[in-house]
Image (tube, helix red, strand yellow):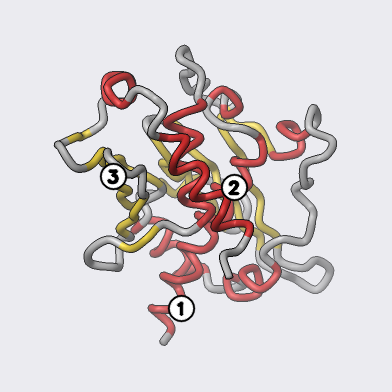
Amino acid sequence: MVSNYEKMKRQMQKEFLKYSQDDMIKRFNIDANERYLTVDFMGGICRIGRKNGFVECSDMDIEGFREADYNEAMTIYDLLCWSKPNAVPAGQFVNMQSISKIHSTAPSANSGFFNQEMKLFDHQDILLREVLEKLGGVIIDGGDLAAQIPVFCGLDLLFRFWNSDDEFAPEIQFFWDANVLSFMHYETVWFANHVLIRRIREMMEKQMS
């Protein structure tokens, strides 16, 4: 039985084919051949089939390409198809609460996402730092560990992590470029957050095994 997520992904796969790929190539300076559009995305590479719109991803620790999951595919489709023609990064970061003020029906930054991942990351500073750098992250001051992560064509995400202590549980914070909603819908920003956390988790688990 096909899930609703899979149905939506397939629908967007068809929708992608309605857009001008030539415009995408020129606008984002995309590598392209007869078969694929290829873009850097969240510390890895994604390629989109030009005839079928099918998205595949290649991660830093994995050879070859695999089918993109729902969050990866929907973020790529939104960036390529929906982003505004004049969208440019602002070069300054705002937190998820600031972004969500005009989106009352969307999840808040404190919705309880990533509880298992926060436990995995907690007090694993050396390993977490190594993984963030493998994803192309630039380590900066902030929290117990913070990194500026390249997402797509100059659009960056600031990831900040706080370890637990006697009073507080571990915490993940996301800060996005102030112009992020010119590149993707608010809901898609959360898809991208999930992409990053999944990639960090999988790379850390591989190192720990």
Above or below: residue 164 compared with residue 48:
below
The picture quadrant where one finds residue 39 is: top left
Residue hosting label 1: 205
Marks 1 and 2, the one that precedes in the sequence = 2
Q: Residue furthest bottom?
A: 209
> Does residue 199 appear to the left or right of 25 in the view shown?
right
Rendered residue at 31%/26% (across/down): 21
Q: Nearer the viewer, mark 3 or mark 1?
A: 3
Looking at the image, the residue that sits furthest to the top is 86
Q: Nearer the viewer, residue 51 or 65?
A: 51
Q: Disc 3 and disc 1: Cα gap in Å?
A: 30 Å
Give the amino acid at mark 1: Glu
Q: Nearer the viewer, residue 204 or 35?
A: 35
Instruction: Determine the secondary structure under disc 1.
Output: helix
Q: Quadrant of the N terminus?
A: bottom right
* Rendered residue at 20%/34% (across/down): 31
Q: Which residue is label 2 attached to?
A: 142
Q: Secondary structure at mark 3?
A: strand
Q: Is residue 192 above or below residue 180?
A: below
Q: Which residue is mark 3?
A: 49
Sequence-wise, which precedes: disc 3 or disc 1? Answer: 3
Q: Identify which residue is drawn at 76% across, 38% down.
A: 97
Mark 2 against mark 3, which lies toward the viewer?
Answer: 3
Place of residue 146 in the rendered image (x, y in percent of width and height, measured from the top left): 54, 51
